Image (cartoon, rainbow, N blue to C red):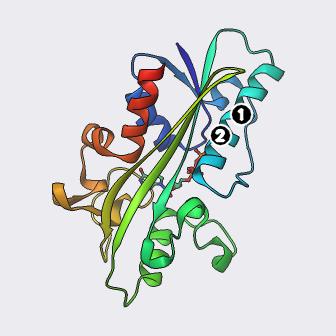
Amino acid sequence: MNILLATGNAHKKSELAAIFSGHSIAIPEDLGLPFDVEEHGMTFLDNSMLKAQALWDLLKERSIPGSWAVIADDSGLVVPALGGAPGIYSARYGSDVYGRMLESPERNRYLLEQLGGITDRRAFFVCCMSLIKDDYVHYTVQETIEGTIIDKEIGSGGFGYDPVFYIESYGMTAAQLDPELKNSISHRGKAGKQIAKLL
Ligand code: ITT
């Protein structure tokens, strides 16, 4: 099946391409589609469905030939000791303070500053993934992976908050995991597996 991913994040694309390896994967850029949707929802669910619907509408509006399924993923890091932050604002965390989008290492430093003096380091990643196969055939699943936030970045794999997200049962950060292993246990990997079954 042809799958169009509602993302501009290259790391997500490569993780999702591995999860949906039996299918042909494209992102809007590959089809020359100008896809930039404002994520104004209040939950991962809102934003995931909003991105999927916006891309589905665009696909139809442009009459792109072929039979397509659209998949969107809204994800982020939730830290209970910070009241759930960065949560749905994970990609933009700290940008209100700095007046610009931060690079991942800067964002991780900002997160560690916010956690200064806090001993409860529990955190989890959330991934809400939506599939649209037809105007009236929509599916959404949401998954998590638990970990703790450590005081410095370790590892060079993955992306975003992976270097500060430590997974107890593997004794390493998400950035130290082999990509295949990350995909088999992560929030995105678990959600993707459910969506793959629905495909
Ligand atoms: P798209 O909306 O274009 O897909 P995005 O990066 O803006 O790309 P989100 O709105 O879903 O995606 O924001 C997710 C942010 O949460 C992402 O930029 C990372 O900072 C963080 N994040 C999500 N999944 C992650 C993972 O597996 N590892 C590390 N950080 C992750």
Q: Is residue 89 above or below residue 73?
A: below
Q: Residue at x 43, y 78 (%)?
A: 81
Relative to 16, residue 66 above or below: above
Residue 154 placement, left or right of 33 = left
Camera-nearest residue between 156 and 20: 20
Displayed quadrant of residue 61: top right
Question: Which picture quadrant has residue 137?
Answer: top right
Say which residue appears at 39% left-offset and 46% top-offset: 187
Question: Is 45 above or below relative to 18?
Answer: below
- Residue underneath mark 1: 53
Residue drawn at point x = 47 percent, y = 22 percent:
198
Give the left or right position of residue 110, taking residue 8 as reference.
left
Q: Amino acid at mark 1?
A: Gln
The residue type indicated by label 2 comes to Met
Query: In the drawing, does residue 69 fall left or right of residue 34?
Result: left
Circle 2: element type = helix
- Structural crowding at the residue carrying mark 2, measured as other residues with C-alpha within 10 Å and reported as few (<14), some (14–19) or many (≥20): many
Q: Give the image location of residue 168, x and y in percent.
A: 20, 62
Q: Can residue 152 be seen in the rendering of this structure?
A: yes
Extreme residue in the right direction: 61
Q: Position of residue 100 (x, y in %)?
A: 67, 69
Label 1 – label 2 distance at C-alpha: 6 Å
| Residue 109 visible from this viewpoint | no
Which mark identifies residue 49? 2
Q: x, y (%) of residue 113?
A: 45, 83
Q: Residue furthest bottom?
A: 117
The residue that appears at 63% across and 65% down in the rendered structure is: 101
Is the residue under label 2 in contact with that under label 1 (CB below 8 Å)?
Answer: yes
As helix, strand or loop, the secondary structure at mark 1 comes to: helix
